[in-house]
Image (cartoon, helix red, strand yellow):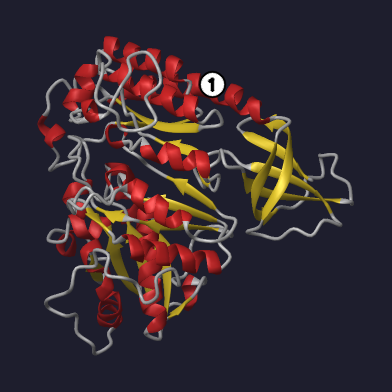
Amino acid sequence: MRYFLDPFGCVKNQVDAETMMAHLDNAGWESTQDSGLAELIIVNSCGFIESAKQESINAVLEWRKLYPEKKILLTGCLAQRYAKELPDLLPEADGFLGVDDILQIVKMADKTAGNSLPLAENSQSSKFKPQLIPGERPLLSLPGSAYVKISEGCSNNCSYCAIPLIRGRLVSRAIPDITEECRVLIKRGKNELCIIGQDIGAFGSDNGAGHGLPELLNAISELDGNFWIRLLYIHPDHFPLRILDLMEKDKRFLPYFDIPFQHASEKILNAMNRGNSFSLLPFVSGSALPKNDSPLREIPANLSEKYLALINTIRTRLPNAVIRSTFLLGFPGETEDDFAALLDFQEKANLDWLGCFTYSREEGTPSYSMKKRVPAKTAALRKKIIEEKQMRITEKNMERFTGQTLDVLVEEKIAADPSTDETDSENIWLGRLYCQAPDIDGSAVIICDKQKNITEGSLQKCRVTARRGFDLEVRVK
């Protein structure tokens, strides 16, 4: 029996898809890239916001239209969030499997495809029961890179977010399990491990044992090899300052920080239920934070100042630091004054990368019933203003890499553009520098002499020769 996987959603969802593939392959199913050859189409869905939900539903409808005779299994966040409603609302799908039950994928695939094995009535929760061999699952990422999910769920309870409704409260993995997965992936030749979770800064806070992100990174630092560790998504309220100590010592931990500030207006942040625990961090007002968790001295007046102090601390400790963030526009009650505060914060923060989103009203979240909703056109206009401003900031910030010699992760060879000056003696590849996270940031356009032997997934020493928009042009040394 063959299956075709159609993946949607975030990289956390991608790891779930890879885990399901590992179990299916081990049970005798065969993955195929040709949907026409598959007996089963698996749509691994996203259920986070309205547009993502609709995209996953449309995929099911399109597959049913294309293949009336095939079986379709809807898995992932959407199947989890609307487990009771979907069988009646989406008859085009033949089966449903939520994120809590992905270890039941083989039984559900067999059942959906018409095999005789029934789905277990009392399925075991998938929350970090290990895949067959940690790190040995099929990978859907580009060559040289892999995602390592260290926690599931989230306990932050941001008022707009449906993640706790879908994936529950925070559940952290055991550090030995994570380090073993990293070891296997490194042995497989993966040169970049992206540490992911809904909020990796909160890692370990659910078990009361004090084994947080710094302890995990210390354990990973004991592994041998030349590889990158990239940390993705640290809630600013939970930023563990001790990781900066480790990054100063071990350059394999990239000075790249994904910190979703979401807003800068005190009123809006409070309505979002963010910033409640930020005062636990030790601050020195108007200057960088101390290296260790020293006693509290003076706290900046408001959250935006605290966030700016955190940014200043990171950049003071790690001058080569790259900071990405996200802003949420059009949250209920957002006024022109609130938007002006966000624009001011954007200017002062001088973020290297920024993603902008407009508010999606999600049933079951606290913000669903909030009054003073912002018109969609107003939110879209504010998003456009932020994005246009950020384009100039990002392009200017990327200029600083010109002339530097840095490692580049090689990802894929591209065909020559006849309009360029490329000669027969050169090859062109795509890859990434440490300042570029997979899929969300710019790329490195690698120019390489043909006599140079480079391969996909390898780390190559390159000199940055120019900026091309958001991308950087580099030449192999």
Front residue of 32 and 220:
220
Residue 36 vertical placement versus 462 (above, below): below
Residue 42 vertical placement versus 58 (above, below): below
Front residue of 119 and 183:
183
On the image, the x and y values in percent for residue 384 come to 43, 23
Quadrant in which the N terminus is drawn = bottom left
- Quarter-of-image position of residue 25: bottom left
Does the rendering let one see residue 64?
Answer: no
- Quarter-of-image position of residue 110: bottom left
Residue 229 vertical placement versus 158 (above, below): below
Total marks drawn? 1
Q: Residues within 10 Å of mark 1 (few under 14, many from 20)?
A: some
Q: In percent of the image, x 36 and y 35: which residue is there?
A: 241
Front residue of 441 and 249:
249
On the image, the x and y values in percent for residue 393 come to 54, 21
Residue beneath label 1, please? 393
Does the rendering let one see residue 85?
Answer: yes
Which amino acid lies under the numbered mark 1 shown in the image of this protein? Ile
Q: In percent of the image, x 66 and y 55: which residue is there?
A: 412
On the image, the x and y values in percent for residue 227 come to 57, 55
Q: In percent of the image, x 82 and y 45: which residue is there?
A: 418
On the image, the x and y values in percent for residue 183 come to 47, 65
Left or right: where does residue 187 sit relative to residue 48?
right
Front residue of 363 and 392:
392
Left or right: where does residue 114 sit relative to residue 386?
left
Q: Circle 1 — which element?
A: helix
**Which residue of the protein is positioned furthest toward the right in this rendering?**
424
